Image (cartoon, helix red, strand yellow):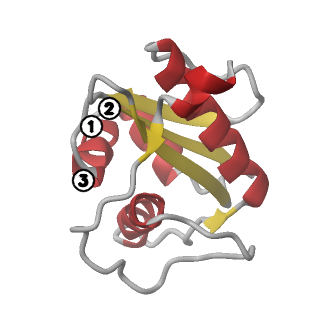
């Protein structure tokens, strides 16, 4: 199992632009550039609609990372059984493409723009075949 988990690599892209300021964080947790950009783009979409930014939750980050690694290792896209709101995707080659896919889906967009949620956790992993698995999780 450990060998399979190591087969999926957390995405760290060196060519991503700087993350815009205004991102809400309430925990001392290190995010990679892709994770930071996922949160920033989500909060930018919320700000355009006068919604409060989502705060990064350490427990949701751990949950999103764990679930995304599981999807990546099993080459499947399946929602978690945890009691969270969740957006998942696979195959998009950039943060912007993943965000756009979610925004083009009414259910996923509703999760991202719900005023009921105040916390977020995100993750993205690349499988050995190059497929990227994406995850956002939300809580009140």
- Left or right of residue 27: residue 136: left
Q: For the residue labelled by badge 3, is the local secondary structure a helix, a strand or a loop?
A: helix
Q: Residue at x 21, y 41 (%)?
A: 93
Q: Which residue is mark 1?
A: 101
Percent across and percent down for residue 8 are 47, 32
Vertically, is 58 above or below 27? above
Q: Residue at x 36, y 77 (%)?
A: 19
Tag 1: Cα neighbours inside 10 Å, few (<14), some, or many (≥20)? some
Separation of disc 1 and disc 3 at Cα? Answer: 9 Å
Q: Nearer the viewer, residue 50 or 103?
A: 103
Separation of disc 3 and disc 2 at Cα? Answer: 14 Å
Percent across and percent down for residue 136 are 53, 43
Asked if the residue under mark 3 is in contact with the one under mark 1, i.e. CB atoms within 8 Å, the reply is: no
Give the mark, 3 or 2, whose residue is nearer the N terminus.
3
State the residue lying farthest toward the bottom.
21
Q: For the residue labelled by badge 2, is the local secondary structure a helix, a strand or a loop?
A: loop
Q: Residue at x 36, y 63 (%)?
A: 41
Tag 3: Cα neighbours inside 10 Å, few (<14), some, or many (≥20)? some
Q: Nearer the viewer, residue 59 or 108?
A: 59
Percent across and percent down for residue 114 are 55, 50
Q: Which residue is mark 3?
A: 96
Q: Quadrant of residue 98?
A: top left
Tag 2: Cα neighbours inside 10 Å, few (<14), some, or many (≥20)? few
Q: Which mark is residue 105?
A: 2
Q: Quadrant of residue 109?
A: top left
Give the mark, 1 or 3, whose residue is nearer the N terminus.
3
Asked if the residue under mark 2 is in contact with the one under mark 1, i.e. CB atoms within 8 Å, the reply is: yes
Vertically, is 41 above or below 19? above
Percent across and percent down for residue 92 are 24, 36
Separation of disc 1 and disc 2 at Cα? Answer: 7 Å
Q: Nearer the viewer, mark 1 or mark 2?
A: 1
Q: Residue at x 54, y 50 (%)?
A: 122
């Amino acid at each position: 199992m450990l060998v399979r988990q190591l087969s999926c690599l957390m995405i760290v892209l060196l060519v991503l632009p700087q993350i815009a300021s205004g991102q809400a964080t309430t925990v001392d947790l290190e995010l990679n550039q892709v994770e930071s950009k996922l949160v920033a783009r989500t909060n930018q979409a919320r700000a355009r609609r006068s919604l409060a930014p989502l705060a990064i939750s350490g427990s949701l980050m751990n949950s999103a990372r764990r679930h995304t690694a599981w999807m990546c290792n099993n080459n499947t896209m399946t929602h978690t059984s945890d009691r969270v709101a969740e957006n998942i995707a696979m195959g998009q080659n950039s943060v912007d493409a993943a965000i756009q896919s979610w925004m083009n889906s009414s259910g996923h967009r509703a999760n991202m723009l719900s005023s009921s949620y105040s916390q977020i956790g995100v993750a993205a992993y690349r499988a050995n075949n190059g497929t990227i698995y994406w995850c956002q999780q939300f809580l009140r």
